Amino acid sequence: MDEKAQELFDLIDAAYNEDLSNQPDIYKSNLLKRAGELESGKDGITVMTEIFKDYPTNALDAMSLPEHSRKLYMYVNERFKKLTEKELRDLNLGVGLIATSFTFGSIM
């Protein structure tokens, strides 16, 4: 695991281990799932994308998050603002391919 992935893992670990009784149960299980993805070698950008997608699914309000969960949320937001052009291209390629199939129909 590289340095950035380890930093993300530590934030996920801290968020998972705090009191999440005021959050939906799926939030805690998603944190565990994302930590497992990092441990299995998935890159940090992909895991952060999944974390970011998990937030609206759980109808979370960033201000209602406990301290470490809020730090994780802010880390993901700040990290997305600092993506390199290559990282942005790689992320947009996947979104573009999906959107193309909706627009023009299935290729197969």
Image: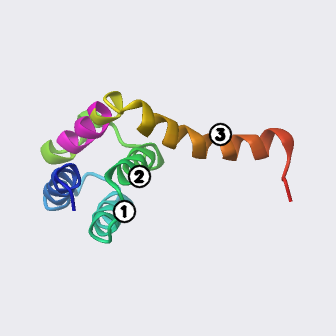
In the image, what residue occupies the spot 20% across and 49% down?
4
- Residue 46, numbered label: 2
Residue 88 % position (x, y) = 46, 35
Distance of label 1 from label 3 (alpha carbons): 21 Å
Instruction: Report the span colored magenta.
Output: 70-78
51 lies above or below 71: below
Label 2 amino acid? Thr
Q: Residues within 10 Å of mark 2 (few under 14, many from 20)?
A: some
Cβ–Cβ below 8 Å for labels 1 and 2? yes
26 versus 106 height, above or below: below
Q: Nearer the viewer, residue 14 or 58?
A: 14
Image position of 67 (left or right of 39): left
Which type of secondary structure does the marked residue at label 2 adopt?
helix
Question: Which x, y percent locates residue 26?
Answer: 38, 61
Q: Residues within 10 Å of mark 1 (few under 14, many from 20)?
A: some
| Relative to 50, 44 lies left or right | left
The answer for how far apart the CA atoms under marks 1 and 2 are is 7 Å
- The image's mark for residue 96 is 3
SS under mark 3: helix
Q: Is residue 72 magenta?
A: yes
Residue 42, disc: 1
